[in-house]
Amino acid sequence: MTAISRLHDLWVRTAEFHRGDIERALAASPGLRGRVRFIYIPHRWWHYQPTPLWRLIEGSIAKPVMNRAYVSNHLTMLPKR
């Protein structure tokens, strides 16, 4: 992430529950704060959780279908410039 952000405008989409860890890491590396932007996705009941059902989905055709639906849903949430 550090190397990529030196040359590119970097946006990272991640789960909301990572916010605390990311904020602590950014506090320890203040130079990154202006070069990397985070979009925090709120948790929904259908999001990944390591349950037996999700483990079954990981190896099935349902995973790419669900990933595509997830991306198309969250692309509409990107902030406008």
Image (tube, grey):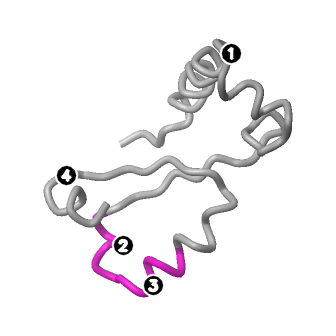
| Relative vertical location of residue 68 with respect to residue 81 in this rendering, above or below | above
Q: CA distance from mark 1 to mark 4?
A: 33 Å
Q: Are marks 3 and 4 in contact (CB under 8 Å)?
A: no
Image-based side of 54 in relation to 6, left or right? right
Looking at the picture, how far across and down is residue 72, in whole percent?
55, 22
Mark toward the start of the polypeptide (3 vs 4): 4
Q: Which mark is residue 8?
A: 4
Mark toward the start of the polypeptide (3 vs 1): 3
Amino acid at the residue labelled 1: Ala
> Which quadrant of the structure image shows residue 73?
top right
Task: Give the dominant element type of the magenta stretch: helix, strand or loop.
Answer: helix
Amino acid at the residue labelled 4: His
What residue range appears in magenta?
23-35
Mark toward the start of the polypeptide (2 vs 4): 4
Q: Which mark is residue 62?
A: 1
Q: Are marks 1 and 4 in contact (CB under 8 Å)?
A: no
Q: Which mark is residue 50?
A: none
Q: CA distance from mark 3 to mark 1?
A: 38 Å
Q: Nearer the viewer, mark 2 or mark 1?
A: 1
Q: Are marks 2 and 1 in contact (CB under 8 Å)?
A: no
Q: CA distance from mark 2 to mark 1?
A: 36 Å
Mark toward the start of the polypeptide (2 vs 1): 2
Q: CA distance from mark 2 to mark 4?
A: 14 Å
Image-based side of 60 in relation to 27, left or right? right
The residue wearing badge 2 is: 33
Amino acid at the residue labelled 2: Arg
Amino acid at the residue labelled 3: Ala
| Badge 2 element | helix
Q: Residues within 10 Å of mark 4 (few under 14, many from 20)?
A: few
The residue wearing badge 3 is: 27
